[in-house]
């Protein structure tokens, strides 16, 4: 798995992408490189489905109801994202590994 992530990083770096073009871009590249039915492809899908974009929630949802004091929302949102990724990895190993 670490080897495939390194290959994806190098491929995107050579194309001139500063980042991996977001999580969806990483999932698409994983599908193209490893295949949809590989462990890496399934793990990427589980991680994509288990996390929410914290900054999108802050901007759209909080902005729509007028919340301006987001002092604790960002750190706790990032902690929740980290917990979602860890849970996704454990679930993927339990189901597909």
Image (cartoon, rainbow, N blue to C red):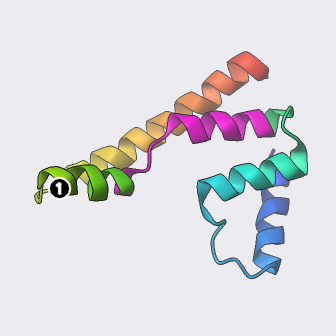
Q: Position of residue 93 (x, y in %)?
A: 71, 24
Question: Which residue occupies the extreme top position in the image?
Answer: 95
Q: Residue at x 59, y 41 (%)?
A: 48
Say which residue label 1 marks: 70
Q: Residue at x 72, y 17 (%)?
A: 95
Q: Is residue 40 left or right of residue 21?
A: right
Of residues 37 and 6, the one drawn nearer to the viewer in this rendering: 37
**Is residue 42 in the magenta section?**
yes
Q: Residue at x 29, y 55 (%)?
A: 60
Classify mark 1: helix, strand or loop.
loop
**Magenta segment range?**
41-55
Give the main secondary structure, helix, strand or loop, of the magenta stretch: helix
Q: Position of residue 8 (x, y in %)?
A: 80, 61
Residue 88 in which image quadrant: top right
Q: Residue at x 85, y 61 (%)?
A: 7
Q: Is residue 55 left or right of residue 31?
A: left
Of residues 78 and 52, the one drawn nearer to the viewer in this rendering: 52
């Amino acid at each position: 798995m670490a080897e495939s992530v390194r290959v994806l990083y190098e491929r995107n770096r050579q194309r001139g992408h500063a980042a991996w073009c977001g999580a969806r871009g990483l999932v698409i590249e994983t599908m193209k490189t490893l295949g949809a039915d590989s462990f890496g492809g399934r793990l990427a899908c589980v991680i994509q489905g288990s996390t929410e974009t914290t900054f999108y929630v802050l901007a759209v949802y909080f902005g729509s109801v007028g919340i301006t004091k987001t002092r604790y929302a960002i750190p706790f949102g990032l902690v929740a994202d980290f917990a979602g990724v860890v849970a996704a990895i454990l679930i993927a190993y339990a189901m597909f590994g």
